[in-house]
Amino acid sequence: MPPARTPDKGLPPWGKGPKPPEFDDWKRGDPLPEDWDPSDRVAIPRPVDPTPVEDGDTTPALNDFKTLASYLSSIGLGELFTMTGDTPGGWLWEQVKNGVTSADQLLIELQETDVFKQRFPLIAQQQAENAAGNITSVYTPEEILQYERTITNVFKRSGLPEWFYDDPVTDIQGLMQEGISPESIVERIEDAYDYVQNAPIEVRQAFNDFYGIKDGEAALATYILDPEKTIQSLTRARRTAYAAGMGRRQNISLSESQAQQIAELPMSESGIVEGLQDVSQMAGLYRESVGESQDLTAEETGVGSVLLGNAQATEALERRRIARSAVTSSGQGGAALTQQGVVGLG
């Protein structure tokens, strides 16, 4: 019988055979022996059970077969066995006849099949790392399936379209490979996806304009779940879109850089809205009247003064207020200062 091993640790450097003498004192995680040639691992044969099961003596083997068939079904690989009445068959039956009696033993053989590699490519990748000497833990099929179930439920609760996660190998195992925990995915969706999805139309449009999300909710979710983006960058992105969207409601057209400056202020969303409203209420000051030549705008001057604390912008607005007050108080021509600028000048 082959030596038992813990399935979630991957194959040892020497492969499936007995431990070579140079590894007698080696423990997992230790550096590999300097005189060990990695090509040796393929030359060491695996022990074979000297007493394979004969076709005519199947009662004990049939019990093992049924147990292992249940295991295969639990990890979604039922195609590797057949059961017609009481007659076992398929790949699994061949393994049982060759002496495989436990799930640990079966997993060693299972990992060599194309069916397993296609369903659990992450395990194959981790094993390749181990074979190359980069010792790392290897997920079990059960751990991967549990991750897939958890993430699928998160996606369903968030209202993502089903086709976004209907292929777990392509859609979900990549997230696991990147080391994104289910908790992190929940945080990403709650912090950015749900926020933008349910935001006012102006905010969502600004998010689309700034970050190139042109293909609906799945594209938005792909952006949010990108492992290269941190929670902090996603929070900044949604606040940037919020500032720009709320600006559009006040007829203030902020650029992405301007909106991001506002997003990074230690200010609540309600504070951002109040500031933008103050900027909008000074619309009359931005419009040039007779005799005025300085170009003032809500986006540069108003936002700079009210929200960003720009001293030059504040000074420019104050000079215009003073100039218009002087015109109003002089009484020449009955001029008056309104939100639309100086009016009544003939």
Image (cartoon, helix red, strand yellow):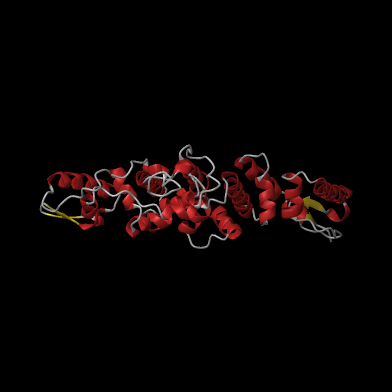
- Residue in view at x 66 percent, y 51 percent: 259
- Asked if 146 appears above or below 207 in the picture, the reply is above
Residue found at the very far front of the displayed protein: 21
Residue 229 location in percent, x, y? 57, 50
Residue 24 visible in rendering: yes
Where is residue 308 shown, x and y percent of the image? Answer: 74, 45
At x 53% / y 55%, what residue is drawn? 223
Residue 163 sits in quarter? bottom left
Q: Position of residue 144 (x, y in %)?
A: 38, 47
Q: Is residue 162 visible?
A: no
> Which quadrant, please, contains the C terminus?
bottom right
Q: Residue at x 54, y 42 (%)?
A: 31
Q: Is residue 229 left or right of residue 300?
A: left
Answer left or right for 273 relative to 107.
right
Q: Nearer the viewer, residue 121 or 171?
A: 121
Q: Where does residue 5 sit, x and y in percent of width and height?
A: 36, 41
Residue 124 vs residue 251, the one in the foreground:
124
- Number of marks in the rendered image: 0
In this rendering, position of residue 6 left or right of residue 90: right
Say which quadrant the N terminus sits in: top left
Q: Does 199 sit above or below residue 267?
A: below
Frontmost residue, 128 versus 215 = 128
Does 292 appear above or below 264? Answer: below
Would residue 158 appear left or right of 327 to someone viewing this image? left
